[in-house]
Amino acid sequence: SPDESHVKTYRHGYRDPNESAPMPQFRVRMDWNNLSYTQFAAQSQGLSHQPQTMTYGHRLESRFGAWTVGLHEIMVSGRDDTDWVYFLPLVPFFVAEHHTGDRDNVTLGLDLNYQLSRLGRIYTELFLDDLLSPGALLDNYWGNKYAWTMGSEWVNLWPGMTYSLEYARVEPWMYSHHTKNGQLQHYGALLGSVIPPNSDQMDTKLRQDLGFQWSLELAFTHRRHQAKARGSSILHIHD
């Protein structure tokens, strides 16, 4: 079982059990025709008794007709000192993190979205955590962590009816780090996902709008999670 002796009190759920608490943050966005760039810096809560960590992120998104392509990085730093290089626009975090001594947790994500006219959309995303190199993605080294998802949403199958289907796979040790405050979390809740490491999940939902702000939903979720294996929780620290 994970060692929770260093863990602070959890705050699971803000408006629902799977949502993390809000974070004070500074965010800027710039748009040029079909290209947009967003960058933020946020104060997050570490798992150990250190009072706070910093979470940085930036995203570059471009639209080509029905295609939308996004590239983003998220970096978590649990150190006492602040490196101002993370605030510089358009500077890749994997370059900046190497400049500061390879002490932080850097992630990289690539997502694609294809809009099917008025029928719906198809999307996929690959999320890499501390990858050494693209050629090492399938190696057994614990640090080569990734998550992958794909799904679709269909609208107007019947007037007011929407259907969605999604599958996601999260590799062991995902969202974790070799330091106690380098995890992608805030008050113990994962950032951007509710699926823990070493899991996969299938979600499907059928929604019918009834008018007057009423709707009817039928949803099914199936998750497989090897909870007893090492690397299945962000509380696990690899030594």
Image: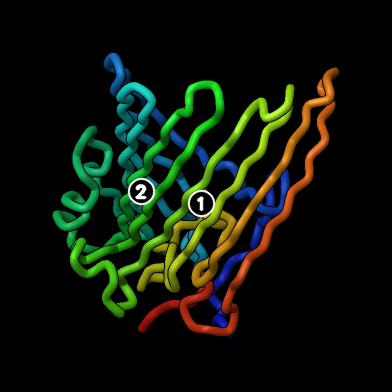
SS for tag 2?
strand
Looking at the rendered image, the quarter that the C terminus falls into is bottom left
What is the total number of numbered labels drawn onto the structure image? 2
Residue drawn 33% across the image and 77% down it: 142
Q: Which mark is residue 74?
A: 2
As shown in the figure, which amino acid type bears the numbered disc 1?
A: Leu
Which quarter of the rendered picture does the N terminus lie within? bottom right
Q: Residues within 10 Å of mark 1 (few under 14, many from 20)?
A: some
Single out the residue that lies furthest toward the top. 33
Q: Which three-letter amino acid code belongs to the residue tagged 2?
A: Ile
Between 125 and 95, the one lying in front of the other is 125
Residue under the point 16% across and 51% down: 95
Q: Is residue 31 visible?
A: yes
Residue 154, quarter of the rendered image: top right
Residue at horizontal 40%, vertical 48%? 125
Please give the name of the residue rendered at 30% of the width and 56% of the height, measured from the top-left corner.
106
Residue 188 appears anywhere in the view:
no
The numbered dot on residue 172 is none
Query: In this orientation, which residue lies closer to the viewer: 54 or 60?
Result: 60
Decide which of tag 1 and tag 2 comes sooner along the chain: 2
* Residue 216 relative to residue 4: left or right: right
Residue 153, quarter of the rendered image: top right
Residue 55: image location, x then y, percent = 40, 48
Residue at which label 1 appears: 191
Horizontal and vertical percent for residue 68? Answer: 36, 31
Q: Residue most toward the front?
A: 157
Choose between 96 and 5: the one closer to the eye.
96
